[in-house]
Amino acid sequence: MSPESVMNMGRLAMETTILVAAPLLLVALIVGLVVSIFQAATQINEATLSFIPKLLSIFVTLIIVGPWMLSVLVTYMRGMFTNFSLLIG
């Protein structure tokens, strides 16, 4: 394996990881921000208040975006397995 192929595999792995994790992280960020604004507006200082809305929103997002995330991961793994003999040889 050449250093270029290793770097390419690592770059592709990081890109896929970021692409798959981005929807869940963005939803958690937006829900956390909304809950924080609500807490600041109502002066409720409860640290555990944001957990349930985040959990529910991530669950709903996973149901909606889950098939796409799975197809991205399957495409990545299929590409790795089909090109593995070319990479090591």
Image (tube, helix red, strand yellow):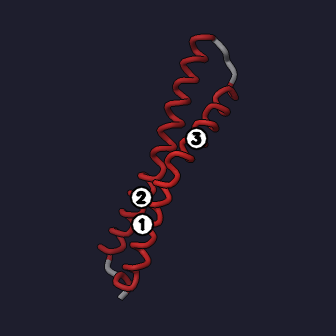
Which residue is label 3 attached to?
60
How far from the left and from the top, in percent, is residue 12? 37, 63
How far from the left and from the top, in percent, is residue 21? 48, 50
Q: Is 89 placed above or below 30 here? A: below
| Quarter of the figure that contains the C terminus | bottom left
Which sits earlier in the primary sequence, circle 1 or circle 3?
Answer: 3
Q: CA distance from mark 1 to mark 3?
A: 23 Å
Q: Residues within 10 Å of mark 2 (few under 14, many from 20)?
A: some
Q: Which mark is residue 75?
A: 1
Q: Is 72 placed above or below 23 here? A: below
Q: CA distance from mark 3 to mark 2?
A: 21 Å
Front position among marks 1 and 2: 1
Which sits earlier in the primary sequence, circle 1 or circle 2?
Answer: 2
Judged left or right of residue 88, residue 30 is right
Residue at 67%, 33% in the rendered image: 52
Which sits earlier in the primary sequence, circle 3 or circle 2?
Answer: 2
Judged left or right of residue 66, residue 59 is right
SS at badge 2: helix
| Quarter of the figure that contains the N terminus | bottom left
Q: Amino acid at mark 1?
A: Thr
Residue at 50%, 37% in the rendered image: 27
Q: Is 23 placed above or below 32 here? A: below
How far from the left and from the top, in percent, is residue 33? 52, 26
Q: Residues within 10 Å of mark 3 (few under 14, many from 20)?
A: some
Residue at 34%, 68% in the rendered image: 7
Q: CA distance from mark 1 to mark 2?
A: 10 Å
Which residue is label 2 attached to?
16
